Amino acid sequence: MEKLAQFYKALGDETRLKIIALLFNKELCVCDIFAAFNLSQPAISHHLKILKQAGVVNDNRVGKWIYYGLNPEALNDVDLFWQKMKRGAAEKIPREPRCAD
């Protein structure tokens, strides 16, 4: 559950959500991500660090460049969690009465 909580905490920022949207279906280097925002490069790096620590993104070094992409394993973990919740909600175990009349 801790990993899931970290995942959702990382998503609790509009800039990080926008970064994730940029990374949909492609890897980007910091310079490409930086170009899409009106923020400093250190600020973008900070957001990427949070996303990486939460497992939302992976990085891949190619020469002197670091490319970031979505971590499919983390997304699968989140999907599995919600599938379990959905199955549990569908089963609806009847409540036992708490108080006697």
Image (cartoon, rainbow, N blue to C red):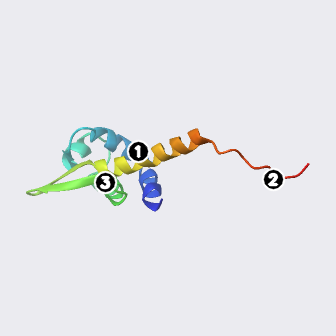
| Mark number, residue 98 | 2
Mark-to-mark CA distance, 1 and 3: 22 Å
Q: Give residue 7's position: percent from left, percent from top.
A: 41, 53
Q: Earlier in the sequence, mark 1 or mark 3?
A: 3
Q: Is residue 63 visible?
A: yes
Of residue 73 and residue 8, the one placed in the foreground of this image is 73
Residue 22 in which image quadrant: top left
Disc 3 marks which amino acid? Answer: Leu
Helix, strand or loop at mark 3:
helix
Count neighbours of disc 1 (C-alpha within 10 A) and say few if under 14, some if 14 to 19, many if 20 or more: few
Q: Give residue 46's position: percent from left, percent from top.
A: 33, 57
| Mark number, residue 48 | 3
Helix, strand or loop at mark 1:
helix
Disc 2 marks which amino acid? Answer: Arg
* Picture layout, residue 73 above or below residue 21: below
Disc 1 marks which amino acid? Answer: Asp
Which residue is disc 1 drawn over? 79
Q: Give residue 87's position: percent from left, percent from top.
A: 52, 42
Of residue 36 and residue 20, the one placed in the foreground of this image is 20
Query: Residue at left 45%, top 51%?
Result: 8
Q: Give residue 52's position: percent from left, percent from top.
A: 31, 57
Count neighbours of disc 2 (C-alpha within 10 A) and say few if under 14, some if 14 to 19, many if 20 or more: few
In this rendering, would 80 be left or right of 65?
right
